[in-house]
Image (cartoon, rainbow, N blue to C red):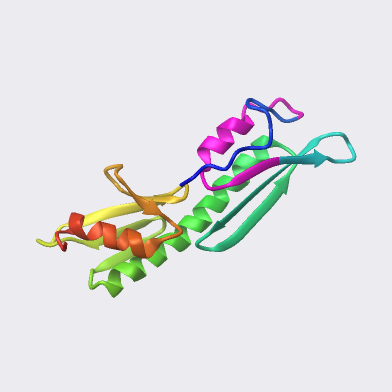
Amino acid sequence: MEKVPNSAPPGSTDRNGDAATFTDLFDEFPGWTIKRVRQNGSGSLLWRAACAGAAGHLAVEVDSLARLREVLDELDRIECRHAAIALRDELRALGVDAQAYGLTVSAMAEGGTRRGVTAHRGVYGWTSGVLLGTVCDPAATARAMLPGLGMA
């Protein structure tokens, strides 16, 4: 995933001096465009994040970086649940016995063992930690899994 340049100075913090910095959020949530947009009437900063993903276009605006982290974390879980179901469906279309459980997909490999894939922070990865692809392209990820399932 390509990173989009941020619009706030590195290390920016919100009016409360939250430990979450803009750069931390930018690194933690790849694929999201995060901006400091303006100050509200009380003089506090407003932060906006937007992302186009498997569940559609998502956007949020909040008044602290700590709250933005909470909201983005929850939105990531929602997005990844949709992505796990999409991956399961793509695998089934390829003839793979696959089940989705929350943020994880379990797929039957040749020989009868199950392999696990998780969706997290915009990417799919084997439970061993090897990245497979982005949640925006479950079809490509399903095809990339086939060699690991002994079906290449």
Residue at 56% across / 32% down in the picture?
24
Residue 74 horizontal side relative to residue 138, left or right = right
Question: Residue 83: x percent and y percent?
Answer: 44, 61
Question: Residue 12: x percent and y percent?
Answer: 68, 27
Q: Start and end of the magenta stretch? A: 15-35
Residue at 27% across / 53% down in the picture?
116
Of residues 135 and 14, the one nearer the viewer is 135
Which corner quadrant of the image does residue 89 belong to?
Answer: bottom left
Question: Residue 82: x percent and y percent?
Answer: 47, 63
Of residues 117 and 34, the one nearer the viewer is 34
Which corner quadrant of the image does residue 91 belong to?
Answer: bottom left
Farthest right residue? Answer: 41
Q: Quadrant of the C terminus?
A: bottom left
Which corner quadrant of the image does residue 59 belong to?
Answer: bottom right
Of residues 1 and 131, the one nearer the viewer is 1
The mark tally for this picture is 0
Residue 123 horizontal side relative to residue 33, left or right = left
Name above or below for residue 66 compared with residue 113: above
Residue 7 horizontal side relative to residue 98, left or right = right
Name above or below for residue 32 compared with residue 99: above
Residue at 9% across / 61% down in the picture?
111
Question: Residue 52: x percent and y percent?
Answer: 57, 57
Farthest left residue? Answer: 111
Q: Is residue 33 magenta?
A: yes
